[in-house]
Image (cartoon, rainbow, N blue to C red):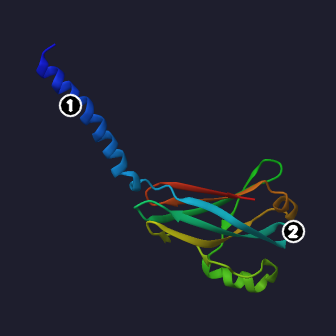
Amino acid sequence: MSKSFGIGFGITAVVIPLLVWWALTATKGNHLAPITKIGKVRVEKVDEGESIAILDFSVDNQSDRKLVVRTVESQLDSPDGSHIDGHIIAARDLDNIFRNYPDLGERYNDPFKAWDEVKPHERLDRMIGVRFDAPDATIAGRKDIELRLEDISGTVVDLKGK
């Protein structure tokens, strides 16, 4: 092995790991992975086969990219293990729901809806209303309520609450 080959190999062995480390740290903020949490779930029975759930939650976007929500979906895990799809209530209808169902309490946060944005390094507290077509006993005995937010880039954020 020649002396110049050994020097070149040594320099390469040092430079390549430095380039890989730099590439990983330089793009760290480009990955959208917000921290989310459902804080409070309030449920109100509408009739024998329908209930409304108000989910108060937070989204903390720690990346350098904004989160633009394309779709919002919700699902409930019933006591028997089946899944019940929820129907998102329009933000403009939530004031009427709080007025007509005072047992839900007061409105703590602004409603969250499709195409809402969470700017880079921003934390938002929001709420969303969901209607479930299921008997009150199923809603009361639920295992989980899941809220799924999908970004326009395809990134999916799942929130779970009780």
Q: What residue is drawn where x is 43% and y is 53%? A: 31
Indicate the quadrant where residue 56 lies: bottom right
Quarter of the image containing the N terminus?
A: top left
Does 97 appear above or below 143?
Answer: below
The numbered mark, 2 or 1, whose residue comes first in the sequence reads: 1
Judging depth in this view, the residue of 114 and 106 nearest the camera is 106
Amino acid type, residue under disc 2 in the picture: Glu
Question: Residue 41's spot in the image, x, y percent?
Answer: 74, 67
Q: What residue is drawn where x is 53% and y is 54%? A: 156
Does 41 appear above or below 142?
Answer: below
Give the crowd class for mark 1: few <14, some 14-19, many >=20 residues within 10 Å.
few
Residue receiving disc 1 = 11
Left/right placement of residue 84 relative to residue 24 reads right
Amino acid type, residue under disc 1 in the picture: Ile
Q: What residue is drawn where x is 79% and y is 47%? A: 81
Mark 2: which secondary structure?
loop
